[in-house]
Amino acid sequence: MNEYDSDFVSQYLINMGYMPIEDPAEADIILINTCTVREKAEHKAYSLMGRISSLKKKRPWIKIGVMGCIAQQEAENLMERFPGLDLVIGPRDIYEFDEIIQRVLEGEKIVSTKLDIIPRIPALRDDFFKGKVKAFISIMQGCNNFCSYCIVPYVRGREVSRPPHEIINEAKFLVSHGIKDITLLGQNVNSYLFNDNGKIIRFSDLIKLLAEIDGLLRLRFTTSHPKDLSDDLIDCFYTLNKLCSHIHLPFQAGSNRILKRMNRNYTREHYMELVRKLREARPDIAITSDVMVGFPGETEEDFQDTLDLIEKVRFDSVFSFKYSDRKGTKASMMPDKINEQEKLKRLKTLQELQKRITLDINKRYEGRIVEVLCEGRSKRGDLWTGRNSQNKIVNFRSDKDELPGNMVKVKILKGYANSLFGEKYYVR
Ligand code: SF4
């Protein structure tokens, strides 16, 4: 989501005649996009704000802004803490970025953190997607769920879905500029809902409309909430070839007691049933997830339930985190906090288990032929790289130059913890 927001403001700035550069010390405008979902990301953002603000001592004319969730949450406090800032702009306010940045360039210092602005189509630029094969489209903003540990509903506001025709036009624009793989973004895409002059468009309807776009090869979406993953969406995995064999479905905890305290509104049994249905619809589907350890009151038994769920589902990968208090959330006021040492111990145990499962799953690809959407040269430079339908990175060798955007058949020779390696496969 933050990457999409960064691209959103970048396109406005490029339209105004600015160009992206690598070194912030030479920039005229610097915008720091921030995240406050986890403690670590927040610390990193504050330290960057300190370093960037000091650049003003040497170049007092530059404009410095902070955007994203910390901007929304801290607003004026940020201006007080970092007097070098010229702009503090919340995630919804970027839809008025063109007007706001103009005022900043004229010398105003602005804090803009309204939460009722309707999302708007980005200032799409012809040259922005040159050489890229993948892009994101934000289909909605905000969240209505109020999971007890989460800050998002407070900093991104309530759910608002964008009109389907806007999303389709954006997708068509991207495809006409070389994009082949689109990921639909939202805090909880499963609850996308738009009343189009009396016709109700659900998320599954939107996906079907997008799948009709000629030239679009792959469709993905993130993030899904298990309580809203409906049968009509699961049916799309039966019927739509363009819908990739991957779903990110955060489970957060394997203990029903903790799920209740988290206000997640599903049980582990419901989650397991969703996994069963998804695998029935698409046997080769990759399932990835988010999980948290050390939620207030989490006992050893609760933690064992989480490990048990991981063993049973066999996720392709999980993003795992230690619980940290987020200011203003219900969980931050709960008693029975777990100490740091215990949280770390649980995190390590969980990550070791998941690492074994991921490696085992990736090794099972050895000998199989997969379709890879080529993205260009690999980081090392001597291989080509891309992703398969399951969103796994595939590095491969080929005896000829591969064009980014081409679909390549690759025989997998080796499965690693974070990627697959193979060679181009020729059908005889
Ligand atoms: S659904 Fe996701 S974004 Fe919304 S409150 Fe829960 S964790 Fe946060």
Image (tube, rainbow, N blue to C red):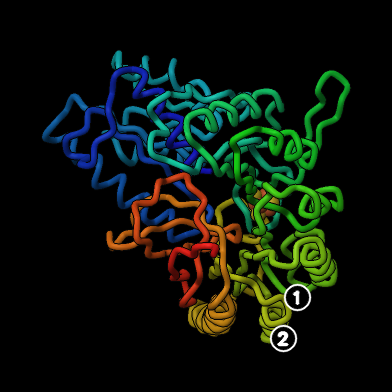
Q: Where 25 falls versus 374 (above or below)?
A: above
Circles 1 and 2: CB distance less than 8 Å? yes
Task: Give the Cα separation between the discs numbered 1 and 2.
Answer: 8 Å
Furthest toward the front, the residue is: 428
Q: Where 165 falls versus 46 (above or below)?
A: above
* Image quadrant in which you'd find residue 380: bottom left
Which residue is tagged 1? Answer: 255
- Residue at position x 11%, y 34% from top? 58
Left or right of 191 in this view: 29: left
Q: Where 292 falls versus 377 (above or below)?
A: below
The three-letter amino acid code for the residue at tag 2 is Glu
Left or right of 371 in this view: 378: left
Q: Position of residue 12 (x, y in %)?
A: 41, 23
Left or right of 235 in this view: 106: left
* Image quadrant in which you'd find residue 356: bottom right
Q: Position of residue 18 (x, y in %)?
A: 28, 23
Crowding at mark 2 (Cα within 10 Å: few <14, some 14-19, many 20+): few
Q: Position of residue 401 (x, y in %)?
A: 34, 52
User: Quick one: label 1 or label 2, which is nearer the N terminus?
Assistant: 1
Mark 2 falls on what kind of element? helix
* Image quadrant in which you'd find residue 330: bottom right
Mark 1 falls on what kind of element? loop
Which residue is tagged 2? Answer: 301
